Amino acid sequence: MILSIDQGTTGTTCLVFDDDGALAGRAYREFTQHFPQPGWVEHDAAEIWTVTEAVAREALDGAGIDSPTAIGITNQRETVCVWDPSTGEPLHRALVWQDRRTADRCDELREQGHEELLRARTGLVIDPYFSATKIEWLLRNVDGLAERARDGRAVFGTVDAWLVFKLTGELVTDVTNASRTLLYDIHAGRWDPDLLELFGVPERALPRVVPSIGEVGRTPAGVPVTGIAGDQQAALYGQGALDPGQGKNTYGTGSFVLLNTGEEAPDPPKGLLATVAWGIGERRVYALEASIFVTGAAVQWLRDGLGLIETAAETEQIAASVDSSGGVVFVPALTGLGSPYWDPYARGTIVGITRGTTRAHLVRATLESIALQTADAIDAMEGAGPPLRELRADGGASQNGWLMQFQADVLGVPVVVAETAETTALGAAFLAGVGAGQWTQGRVRELWRERARFEPAMSADERAERRAQWSRAVERALRWAEG
């Protein structure tokens, strides 16, 4: 039995998987979100640990066991915790990946010409999303913290590091989470001294970087922690996408597309990120990543903002009730556009409305926008990584059969929906199982199972026409940013 801890942005889920990768126990609990100022988002790390302990025990009880064989951890990425390593007490609330308080500092770094260096070393872009400016803010704004960090009396880590510390007393982070900090050289495989100096972060205040697969410590009861990865990387592993050219999209409030590029770090095109997918021994596997800001959130807007639907589930039947979107194209840039455009100033645009436009046309155009944004991101990956052979889908919207078929049509490759919906947690279990010697990576490929497969049925001409129509609408959304 493997205990998988899936520590997310609004709550913690713990699942227990048996030797065949089947779900044996599950529990979930939310924790408090703190918003001290507009644009600021914080979590109480102590509460995260308390909730995680309780949910893990509930999941183990549900599986009918007292102790698992091993523990795997997957977590919200980029969120920064800070604590006293001698007492284990947090020294400030965690700054969450959504927190935007360092936006002005990021503008300053770009103006100073640091973007090229950061991009070359880390594969990332300068954005408050990532951890480095959060750590820098804490060092500059929490009384006495800079001195404590220099003296070894304060340490920083992403949520995986915090949970491992509380479970085992070890101060480590895995290579996938390190690669999301803007402090880690993904090519050299180390905390980068130039970047540490740029942000004023003492290396002694950071965890030791370890592979994603392998034992990093044991609980007081002797249970080893043998797998760690950030949530999107864990989902890629949970999808069994272990070979170059395999990719996944997690369809949530936004969407994250990851493409396995093998053991050579890719040179990411504009608007995309290069990241470490996982590490095993001395080997690092890399991925291209696209972040799409608004996908499921667009459906939520139809429901909560416009009142056009009562539930997200009904969009499948509504979209299928019309032959087309009637020429309507919706670009859901409700919070800007993510990959591959990465323009925070773009705004939502609906074009092609006529007197004959109905609710069904708008609903269908919304679902189409989810697939078309994904296709844009995957197109941008071409040339920087191996060609996508099939797209493996997970997340809530992967249950929408109409959307999955349209996704296959506009991509021109099969879309495969996993049997296990919670592939992020399954990925953490797979990592831990391999790290504990319970499974091999070959066995992981066997344990992954598909629930449904969607083959492309759209003609090449129609696909090109749809994509061209979408591109014209995106240009209008981007022009909004130009005034």
Image (tube, helix red, strand yellow):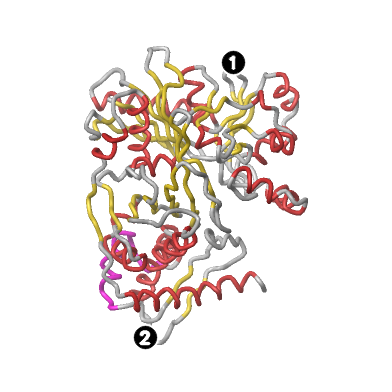
User: Residue 223 in the image: x percent, y percent?
Assistant: 37, 17
Q: Is residue 309 magenta?
A: yes
Q: Is residue 324 left or right of residue 276?
A: left
Q: Which residue is mark 1?
A: 87
As measured in the structure, the alpha-carbon distance from the residue carrying label 1 to the one carrying label 2 is 66 Å
User: Residue 333 in the image: x percent, y percent?
Assistant: 52, 65
Q: Secondary structure at mark 2?
A: loop
Q: Secondary structure at mark 1?
A: loop
Quadrant holding the N terminus: top left
**Amino acid type, mark 2:** Gly
**Residue placed furthest toward the bottom:** 355
- Residue beneath the point at 58% across and 43% down: 41
- Residue beneath the point at 39% across and 53% down: 249
Q: Which residue is mark 2?
A: 356
Quadrant holding the C terminus: bottom right
Residue 398 lies, with reference to residue 34, above or below; the image says below
Q: How many marks?
A: 2
Q: Dot 1 surroundings within 10 Å: few (below 14), some, or many (20 or more)? A: few
Q: Nearer the viewer, residue 210 or 60?
A: 210
Q: Which stretch appears magenta?
A: 307-323
